[in-house]
Image: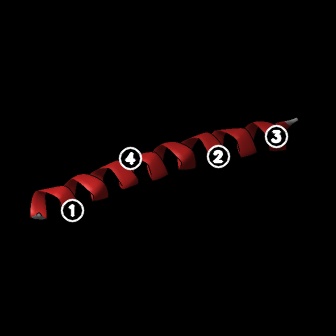
């Protein structure tokens, strides 16, 4: 049970981090243009 919760948190955190980085790079590129 606890392992499943930790796994979900890690997966969700990883996806959020990736989306955050991609969004930041996209915004930075758009702002530079």
Q: Nearer the viewer, residue 29 or 1?
A: 1
Question: Mark 2 or mark 4, which is nearer the start of the sequence?
Answer: 4
Question: Mark 1 or mark 3, which is nearer the start of the sequence?
Answer: 1
Q: CA distance from mark 3 to mark 1?
A: 37 Å
Callout count: 4
Residue 1 against residue 31 in the figure, above or below = below
Which residue lies under the disc numbered 1? 5
Q: Nearer the viewer, residue 6 or 25?
A: 6
Q: Nearer the viewer, mark 1 or mark 4?
A: 1
In this picture, residue 20 sits left or right of residue 25: left
Q: Nearer the viewer, mark 3 or mark 2?
A: 2
Which residue lies under the disc numbered 2? 23
Question: Mark 4 or mark 3, which is nearer the start of the sequence?
Answer: 4
- Crowding around mark 2 (Cα neighbors within 10 Å: few <14, some 14 to 19, many 20+) is few
**Residue found at x 82% / y 44%:** 31
Q: Nearer the viewer, mark 3 or mark 4?
A: 4
Q: CA distance from mark 4 to mark 2?
A: 14 Å
Q: CA distance from mark 1 to mark 4?
A: 14 Å
**Residue found at x 71% / y 39%:** 26
- Crowding around mark 3 (Cα neighbors within 10 Å: few <14, some 14 to 19, many 20+) is few
Q: Secondary structure at mark 1?
A: helix
**Residue found at x 63% / y 46%:** 24
Q: Nearer the viewer, residue 15 or 24?
A: 15
Which residue lies under the disc numbered 3? 30
Q: Secondary structure at mark 3?
A: helix
**Residue found at x 18% / y 57%:** 4
Which residue lies under the disc numbered 4? 14
Q: Secondary structure at mark 4?
A: helix
């Amino acid at each position: 049970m606890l392992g499943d919760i930790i796994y979900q948190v890690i997966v969700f955190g990883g996806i959020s981090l990736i989306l955050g980085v991609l969004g930041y790079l996209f915004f930075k590129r758009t702002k530079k243009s």
